[in-house]
Image (cartoon, rainbow, N blue to C red):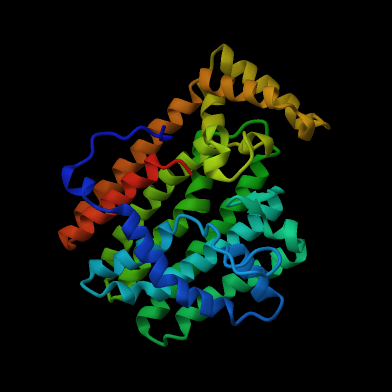
C-alpha cells in the first residue's frame, strides 16, 4: 500500500510516465556527476563512488541503488519551462545532487545510521573522517560545477544553491536540537523540515530554469512549487521513517523512533491531546532519560508507533502531505510554461506523495 493514498488525479497527468522522467534526469546527470567525483583526490573519489552505488565496499563495479533521482529530474524539467532543452539544466542537476549527497553523508554520521539504500553507510565502511571529508568535497564541487560555466545565469544559479545549502544546514541543526527536547511544536517541525528538505527541492525546481534564462519571478514561483513539494516529500518520509517497510526503504524498522526524531507524526500526536497523546508524552519523556534505549525491543518501538497512530499523528501527517501537495500544484498556475511540462511537474508531485520509499 502507498504511504499516502492517492487523491483524485487529473487525467492529463496520469498519462505521464514518471519513471521515464526520473530515468531521464538520472541518465543526463550521471556522466557529469561521475566526472565531477573523478576530480576528488584518492581515496575520496573511491569513497564517493561507493556512496553513489557505483562500486561495492571492495572497489568492484556495482549497480547500486543511487536513490530516487527526483532532484535531477526536477532540474532538467525546469529548464524546459523557459523553452530551453533539458540539457541546459544538467549543471544545475549535478550541483543539487552533489549538495544532497553531501547532506546524506554527514546526516548518516550524525544520526548514527548504519544503512542507506540497502547497504552499509560510508562512515560505517570507510570511517567518520572520510564521511566528513567527502561530504565537504561534494558541497564545494557543486559550486565549482556551476561557476566554471562563467555566465551570468550560472552566477544566479550558484547564489540559489548556496542559499539552499545554508538553509539545509540550518534544518539539520534544528533537527538535532529537537531530539533533546521533550516537546516541539508543529510549527517548529514544519520550519525545520522546510529548511532541511524544502529548500533544496525548491532550488532543484528553479535552477534549470535559471540556467535557461528565466526571470526571477518565474524562478521564485518554481521555488514555491518545490518548497511545498519538499514539505509533502518530508511528510511522506516521516511516515516511512516509522511505518515504512524496511525491504523498500533500506532502513531499520521504526528507524525514526530509534533516533528519537521529533518528526511530524510524533509532534502532531503529542499536540493532539487525549489519553493516547498524554501516554505517548510520558513514554517519550522517559525515553529521553533512558540509558538502555538502544536495547529496546521491537515490541517496545511498535507500542510507541501504535500510540502515535491512536493519537492521530499518522493521519495528520497524511493530510499534511496532501495539503502541501495541493499548494505546490496551485503554484504552477501562476506562470506560463508548456502544458506538457506543467503536467510533468504535477505528475512528479503525485509520485512524491504516494511513494513507498
Q: Residue at x 43, y 46 (%)?
A: 233
Figure quadrant of residue 84: bottom left
Q: Residue at x 42, y 50 (%)?
A: 230
Along the line of sight, the residue nearer the viewer: 311 or 123: 123
Q: Position of residue 120 (x, y in %)?
A: 68, 54
Q: Residue at x 46, y 76 (%)?
A: 31
Residue that sits furthest to the top in the current view: 275
Along the line of sight, the residue nearer the viewer: 262 or 252: 252
Q: Position of residue 311 (x, y in %)?
A: 52, 19
Marks counted in the figure total: 0
Figure quadrant of residue 2: top left
Q: Position of residue 91 (x, y in %)?
A: 42, 76
On the picture, is 236 further left or further right than 49?
A: left
On the picture, is 34 further left or further right than 6?
A: right
Quadrant showing the N terminus: top left
In the rendered view, tell whether residue 267 sits above or below residue 144.
Answer: above
In the rendered view, tell whether residue 347 sits above or below residue 48.
Answer: above
Figure quadrant of residue 252: top right
In the rendered view, tell whether residue 114 sits above or below residue 3.
Answer: below
Q: Position of residue 295 (x, y in %)?
A: 79, 31
Along the line of sight, the residue nearer the viewer: 211 or 52: 52
On the picture, is 154 further left or further right than 197?
A: left
Amino acid at each position: 500500500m502507498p504511504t499516502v493514498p492517492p487523491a483524485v488525479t487529473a487525467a492529463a497527468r496520469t498519462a505521464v510516465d514518471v519513471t521515464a522522467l526520473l530515468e531521464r534526469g538520472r541518465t543526463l546527470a550521471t556522466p557529469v556527476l561521475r566526472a565531477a567525483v573523478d576530480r576528488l583526490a584518492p581515496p575520496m573519489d573511491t569513497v564517493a563512488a561507493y556512496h553513489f552505488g557505483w562500486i561495492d565496499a571492495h572497489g568492484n563495479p556495482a549497480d547500486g541503488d543511487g536513490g530516487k533521482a527526483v532532484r535531477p529530474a526536477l532540474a532538467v524539467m525546469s529548464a524546459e519551462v523557459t523553452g530551453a532543452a533539458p540539457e541546459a539544466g544538467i549543471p544545475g542537476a549535478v550541483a543539487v545532487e552533489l549538495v544532497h549527497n553531501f547532506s546524506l553523508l554527514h546526516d548518516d554520521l550524525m544520526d548514527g545510521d548504519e544503512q542507506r539504500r540497502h547497504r552499509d553507510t560510508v562512515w560505517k565502511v570507510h570511517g567518520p573522517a572520510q564521511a566528513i571529508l567527502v561530504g565537504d568535497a561534494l558541497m564545494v564541487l557543486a559550486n565549482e560545477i556551476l561557476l566554471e560555466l562563467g555566465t551570468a545565469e550560472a552566477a544566479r544559479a550558484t547564489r540559489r544553491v548556496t542559499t539552499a545549502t545554508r538553509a539545509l544546514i540550518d534544518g539539520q541543526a534544528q533537527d538535532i536540537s529537537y531530539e533533546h527536547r521533550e516537546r516541539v511544536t508543529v510549527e517548529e517541525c514544519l520550519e525545520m523540515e522546510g529548511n532541511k528538505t524544502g529548500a533544496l527541492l525548491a532550488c532543484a525546481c528553479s535552477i534549470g530554469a535559471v540556467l535557461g534564462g528565466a526571470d526571477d519571478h518565474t524562478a521564485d514561483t518554481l521555488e514555491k512549487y518545490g518548497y511545498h513539494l519538499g514539505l509533502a516529500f518530508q511528510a511522506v518520509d516521516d511516515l516511512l521513517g516509522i511505518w515504512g517497510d524496511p525491504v523498500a526503504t533500506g532502513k531499520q524498522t521504526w528507524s525514526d523512533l530509534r533516533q528519537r526524531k521529533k518528526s511530524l507524526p510524533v509532534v502532531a500526536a503529542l499536540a493532539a491531546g487525549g489519553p493516547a497523546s498524554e501516554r505517548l508524552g510520558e513514554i517519550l519523556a522517559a525515553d529521553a532519560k533512558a540509558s538502555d534505549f538502544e536495547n529496546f525491543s521491537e515490541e517496545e518501538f511498535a507500542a510507541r508507533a501504535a500510540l502515535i497512530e491512536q493519537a492521530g499523528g499518522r493521519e495528520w501527517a497524511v493530510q499534511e502531505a496532501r495539503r502541501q501537495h495541493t499548494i505546490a500544484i496551485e503554484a504552477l498556475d501562476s506562470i506560463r510554461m508548456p502544458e506538457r511540462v506543467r503536467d510533468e511537474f504535477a505528475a512528479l508531485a503525485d509520485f512524491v506523495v504516494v511513494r513507498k520509499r
